Image (tube, helix red, strand yellow):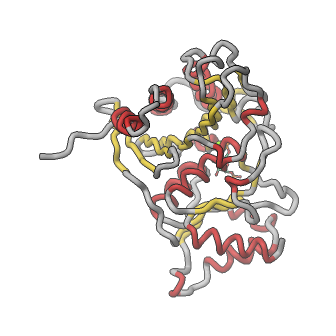
Amino acid sequence: MSRFPVTLTRHILEQQAAHPGAKGDFSLLMAHIGLVGKMITSSLRRAGLINILGLSGETNVQGEAVKKLDVLANETFIKVFQTNGLVCALASEEEEKALVLPEAWTQAKYMLLFDPLDGSSNTDVNMPLGTIFSILRHHDPRQSPQETDLIRRGREQVAAGYLLYGSSTMLVYTTGQGVHGFTLDPQIGEYVLSHESIKMPSRGSIYAVNEGNYHKWPAGMRRYIDQLKVKDKSKGRPYTGRYSGCLVADVHRVLLSGGIYLYPAEVERPEGKLRLLYEASPLAMVVEQAGGLASTGTERILDLEPLTLHQRVPLLIGSREDVLEAEAAVKATA
Ligand code: AHM
Ligand code: MG
């Protein structure tokens, strides 16, 4: 007899049962992230038909042109979490300031950071998109959280994960006990466990990087990428290049098949492009839990002490041996 499908709800409840003191808040929080994922999926599936493609006309805190779908995904997150009493503070890549929820902080012990729509240059061309989330604990329920409480090292995350809107919608998450992937079954409207305890290969043969930036990189990074293309049977080279323009999609591929994603420092942009708290830290937690590594080139992402909410960081993430090799190349010219 085939096994009854394990839904996200059942999976989280089973994990909760292993923590006798747990009151179920975390389970509800994850269920609501799943709900946001379904709402965004529903908008994306019809985006070309209901006039929600293209630019909104605004510029965000990062100085980037905002897409209508960025706004929609951000508003969906805020609408769902502003009033459900599960979190006491929210921070979004699209919002300049954190949103502290004063009426929730006495009972809500979690805080949520998110990139509502990752890879939004893909919106108008029907390519993959993602959502990234990071969950922190609010330590002192006697005090309202401050924005500074959200600016924490990645290793303090309670849970992290992403939604990938690809040919199917997937939710992948970790609470520090392995990485689990769920596929949204549109027929029953449930996330079903499809990838249990994901473990990455220690080396891959795929690299994902925007090579259009080649001449902006320091010499060590250029040399590293050059080497990946040189035939070397013992190292499985040449590597295959795969870059979708959506960090979530590219990291997901690397998570399942091995390899490396890079958005490195540039000579004139040493801070890189990606955001530490909304992108690098949560994905680093997922990848490390699956046996991989995530680094700036010189430091472990999860150990970085962030200074600001929207801080950017160079990112080298993927299979252990690949990241160590890329790090060595960066350090050689650091
Ligand atoms: P976004 O969150 O504003 O979409 O920016 C992050 C995205 C990543 O998903 C992707 O890997 C990268 O930026 C693409 O940048 P580029 O077009 O410079 O290669
Ligand atoms: Mg992003």
Q: Is residue 184 visible?
A: no
Residue in front for this viewpoint, 36 or 180: 180
User: Looking at the image, which residue sits at the far top?
Assistant: 103
Task: Report x, y in % for residue 112.
Answer: 62, 32
Residue at x 57% of width, y 54% of height: 244
Count of number-bearing discs: 0
Residue 195 in the image: x percent, y percent? Answer: 37, 51
- Determine the residue located farthest toward the right in the rendered image: 268
Q: Quadrant of residue 265?
A: bottom right
Residue 103 location in percent, x, y? 66, 12
- Left/right of residue 116 with respect to residue 311 in the rendered view: left
Q: Residue at x 79, y 33 (%)?
A: 148
Q: Position of residue 144 (x, y in %)?
A: 73, 20
The vertical placement of 33 against 142, above or below, is below
Residue projecting furthest to the left:
1
Q: Residue at x 42, y 48 (%)?
A: 180
Who is closer to the viewer here, 215 or 286? Answer: 286
Q: Residue at x 77, y 26 (%)?
A: 146
Rendered view: 144 above or below 253: above
Residue 142 vs 150, above or below: the answer is: above
The answer to whether residue 29 is left or right of residue 105 is left
